[in-house]
Amino acid sequence: MELENEIDVGEVITLTDEESGQDIDFTVMYIFEIEDRTYLCLVPVDQEEEEEYEVHFLRYDGTDTLHPIESDEEWEQVEATFETIMDELEKEDD
């Protein structure tokens, strides 16, 4: 998946679903790092206001390419880091 420029939180990016060929708009909700890798947390724009929504994670290489998370180990790291971020944000809101 290729992008045209750098990515910022709150930005809307359009990705093409490889299965359906349909373009889907996503909002970049969070950008975080694990070791030397950067990840994006994306939520479909049409689900942003819903109480429950799909969350997608992609690895961002700093250029114009996003990569899917392919290994279970990498997925577990991303999921654990994201849960930690969410816990910290909830504590700030209290």
Image (spheres, rainbow, N blue to C red):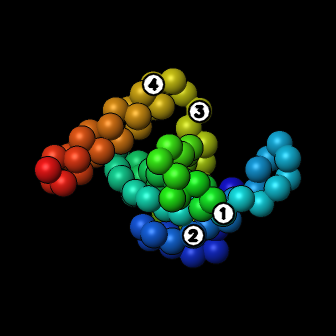
The residue that appears at 42% across and 67% down in the rendered structure is 9
Q: Type of residue at label 2?
A: Val
Mark 2–mark 4 distance (CA, rounded to whole Å): 28 Å
| Comes first in the chain, label 2 or label 3 | 2
**Residue wearing tag 4:** 73
Mark 4–mark 3 distance (CA, rounded to whole Å): 9 Å
Few, some or many residues within 10 Å of mark 4 (<14, 14–19, 20+)? few
The residue that appears at 24% across and 41% down in the rendered structure is 87
Q: Residue 34: which quarter of the image?
A: top left
Pointer 1 with pointer 2, Cβ within 8 A:
yes
Mark 2 vs mark 3, foreground winner is 2
**Residue wearing tag 3:** 70
**Residue wearing tag 1:** 25
- Name the side, left or right, on which 38 lies relative to 13: left
Q: Residue 31: which quarter of the image?
A: bottom left
Q: Secondary structure at mark 4?
A: helix
Mark 1–mark 3 distance (CA, rounded to whole Å): 22 Å
| Comes first in the chain, label 1 or label 2 | 2
Can you say which quadrant of the picture contains the N terminus?
A: bottom right
